[in-house]
Image (cartoon, rainbow, N blue to C red):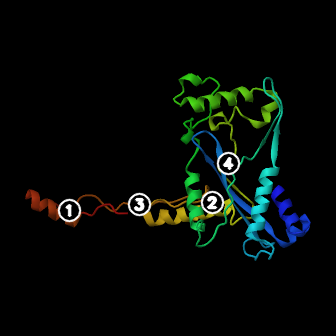
């Protein structure tokens, strides 16, 4: 919201006029640092009013967007109420803000960004040394197989989460994630594609993979699948089997068919 307000102000537009001329979209991923701090990496773009398929207005420059991002990061803060032993605190973005333009052939290309996102998507809180499961109320923190630093962070989440004033942050439930309860990846509704389309494409791909690799393809839950149909063809050795057995044993066997699918 702060970003859109700033872009509208820099462009000399109202927020309604901004929606009529341009669309701001983002996709971001969360990356855990070993010290337990979460870094956010975001791709922010300005398109025409109908999204990526439309050309952005002439005033939508990289410098304007950089200014808006820097302003929004400095303007946004969250106030946490006071609890016993802790004063009222205001949390905001720190000074580690790096805004760079994505280009087709520069230092930061679109392919490099895609590689970064793939890397962060596989880097979870375990790099801090915490648990890959939620903390059970009966767990003994001292006995958990974790390092001292994440152990202290988890203990602090459990302590702060017990205060009624901080219940909304659900620190106890997400203590194993060091208090971060967000998804590793989020995006604007109309950025690039939708998660539903991605899931549908993945399902269709798996159907094709199942057919080419010999696995059973994916069907709807109520589908009755007939794997094969059998019928009785006879008993005894086939002509080829009878000839082979006769050659090996010297005995003669009558061929009377077999069972086929």
CB under 8 Å between discs 2 and 1: no
- In which quarter of the view is residue 220 placed? bottom right
The answer to whether residue 76 shows anywhere in this view is yes
Cα distance in 3D space between marks 4 and 2: 17 Å
Packing grade of label 3 (10 A; few <14, some 14-19, many >=20) is few
Crowding at mark 2 (Cα within 10 Å: few <14, some 14-19, many 20+): few
- Residue behind mark 4: 183
Mark 2 vs mark 3, foreground winner is: 2
Please report whichever mark, 1 or 4, sits nearer to the chain's N-terminal start: 4
Q: Marks 3 and 4, Cα distance to the nearest angstrom?
A: 51 Å
Q: Earlier in the sequence, mark 3 or mark 1?
A: 3
Disc number for residue 199 = 2
How many residues crowd mark 4 within 10 Å: few (<14), some (14–19), many (20+)?
A: few
Residue 213 locus on image (x, y percent): 43, 63
Query: Which residue is tagged 3?
Result: 230
> Image quadrant for the C terminus?
bottom left
Image position, residue 119 (x, y; %): 55, 54
Numbered disc 4: secondary structure: loop
The answer to whether residue 245 is left or right of residue 118 is left
């Amino acid at each position: 919201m702060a970003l859109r307000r700033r872009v509208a102000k820099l462009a000399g537009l109202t927020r309604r006029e901004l929606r009529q001329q341009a669309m701001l979209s983002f996709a971001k991923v969360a990356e855990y640092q070993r010290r337990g701090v979460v870094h956010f990496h975001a791709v922010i773009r300005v398109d025409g009013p109908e999204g990526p398929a439309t050309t952005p207005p002439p005033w939508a420059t990289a410098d304007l967007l950089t200014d808006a991002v820097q302003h929004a990061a400095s303007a946004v803060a969250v106030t946490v109420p006071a609890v016993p032993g802790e004063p009222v605190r205001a949390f905001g973005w720190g000074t580690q803000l790096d805004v760079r333009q994505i280009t087709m052939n520069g230092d930061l290309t679109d392919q490099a960004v895609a590689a970064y996102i793939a890397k962060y998507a596989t880097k979870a809180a375990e790099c801090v040394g915490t648990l890959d499961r939620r903390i059970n109320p009966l767990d003994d923190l001292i006995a958990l197989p974790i390092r001292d630093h994440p152990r202290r962070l988890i203990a602090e989440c459990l302590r702060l989460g017990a205060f009624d004033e901080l219940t909304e942050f659900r620190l106890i439930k997400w203590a194993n994630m060091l208090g971060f309860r967000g998804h590793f990846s989020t995006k604007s509704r109309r950025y690039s594609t939708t998660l539903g389309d991605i899931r549908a494409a993945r399902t269709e791909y798996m159907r094709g993979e199942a057919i080419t690799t010999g696995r059973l393809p994916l069907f709807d839950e109520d589908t009755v699948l007939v794997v094969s149909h059998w019928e009785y063809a006879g008993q005894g050795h086939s002509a080829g089997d009878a000839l082979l057995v006769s050659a090996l044993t010297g005995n003669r066997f009558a061929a009377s068919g077999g069972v086929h699918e």
